[in-house]
Image: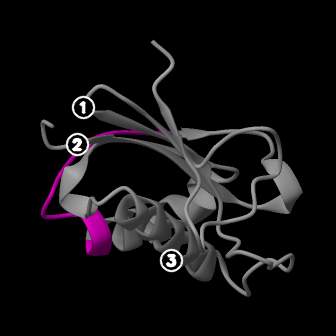
Amino acid sequence: MNGTELMADGGPDPVAAYPHARRVGNFLFISGLGPHKRGERELPATFADEVHGVFYNLKVILEAAGLGLENVVDVTGFLTDLETDFATYNAIYAEYLGQIRPARTTIQVSALPRGIHVEIKVLAVCPAD
């Protein structure tokens, strides 16, 4: 079962060959999201701005699928510097998902595409058809 590909109008420009998301059954698998908005190439000014950009992109993709943040059930966060950036990431994450409390993993990686410092991969649940 391949599912249905989703490319959201207003979603970020993919940096490789992948859709913004793929729906399989009642699950929406959202590809890794960085902070760049559609058409942007410059990094946001601060790490906090990058994190807000990531969640902006998540909301755009969820809305294109007819969903909202309340449908998020799992988040994997990738940071390039946990020691420096985790507290900021955690605080901003809580602004968006603190009341929803999806399952969560945060890991440090050595690098991310296009020089970004944060990326998230998300699983959301869609209402039954």
The C terminus lies in which quarter of the figure? top left
Q: Residue at x 47, y 71 (%)?
A: 88
Query: How far apart are labels 2 and 1 at the CA level?
Result: 5 Å
Specify the amino acid type for callout 3: His
Specify the amino acid type for callout 1: Asn
Specify the amino acid type for callout 2: Cys
Q: Residue 121: give x, y in percent of width and height.
A: 51, 43
Q: Nearer the viewer, residue 16 or 122?
A: 16
Magenta span of residues: 95-106
* Image vertical order of residue 49 relative to residue 102, above or below: below
**65 on left or right of 82:** left
The N terminus lies in which quarter of the figure? top left
10 Å crowding of disc 3: few (<14), some (14-19), many (20+)? many
User: Quadrant of residue 104 in the image?
Assistant: top left
Q: Residue 73: give x, y in percent of width and height.
A: 24, 41
10 Å crowding of disc 2: few (<14), some (14-19), many (20+)? some
Query: Badge 3 is on which residue?
Result: 52
Q: Nearer the viewer, residue 58 or 67?
A: 67
Query: How far apart are labels 1 and 3 at the CA level?
Result: 27 Å
Instruction: Name the element at disc 3.
Output: helix
Asked if the residue under mark 1 is in contact with the one under mark 2, i.e. CB atoms within 8 Å, the reply is: yes
* Image vertical order of residue 51 relative to residue 122, above or below: below
Q: Residue at x 21, y 51 (%)?
A: 71
Asked if the residue under mark 3 is in contact with the one under mark 1, i.e. CB atoms within 8 Å, the reply is: no
**105 on left or right of 7:** left
Query: How far apart are labels 2 and 3 at the CA level?
Result: 24 Å
Q: Residue 91: give x, y in percent of width and height.
A: 36, 71
**Residue 126 - label:** 2
Q: Is residue 100 magenta?
A: yes
**Residue 26 - label:** 1
Instruction: Name the element at disc 2.
Output: loop
